[in-house]
């Protein structure tokens, strides 16, 4: 989870982030499940940036 990122929002988007990192779509638009203050996220792959750490 990125530093400072909302834990509840991360729970909603993490499976999409992991899927994108493993060859999924390059761009994905999604929303967190907060019924009172929903936040829309546009997730984009950054070309050429990878994290090789285990």
Image (cartoon, rainbow, N blue to C red):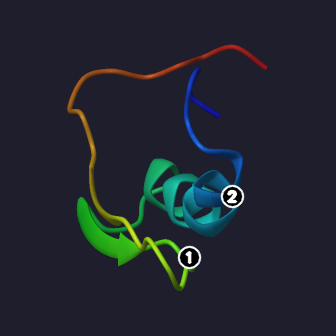
Residue at 70 percent across and 60 percent down: it is 11
**Image disc number at residue 34:** 1
User: Could you tell which of marks 2 and 1 lies nearer the N-terminus?
Assistant: 2
Q: Is residue 45 above or below residue 30?
A: above
> Residue 12's x, y, as percent?
61, 68
Q: Image quarter for residue 45?
A: top left
> Residue 43's x, y, as percent?
30, 55
Residues marked 2 and 1 touching at CB (< 8 Å): yes
Residue at 20 percent across and 32 percent down: it is 47
Q: Nearer the viewer, residue 15 or 37?
A: 37
Q: Local crowd at mark 1 within 10 Å, few (<14), some, or many (≥20)?
A: few
Q: Which residue is mark 2?
A: 8
> Residue 13's x, y, as percent?
55, 63
* 2 displayed left or right of 11: left
Q: Is residue 9 above or below residue 4?
A: below
* 25 displayed left or right of 37: left
Q: Image quarter for residue 53?
A: top right
Q: In the current view of this chain or complex, which residue is farthest to the top?
A: 53
């Amino acid at each position: 989870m990125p530093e400072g990122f909302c834990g509840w929002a991360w729970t909603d988007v993490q499976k999409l982030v992991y899927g994108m990192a493993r060859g999924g779509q390059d761009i994905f638009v999604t929303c967190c499940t907060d019924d009172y203050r929903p936040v829309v996220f546009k997730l984009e792959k950054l070309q050429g940036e990878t994290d090789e750490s285990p």
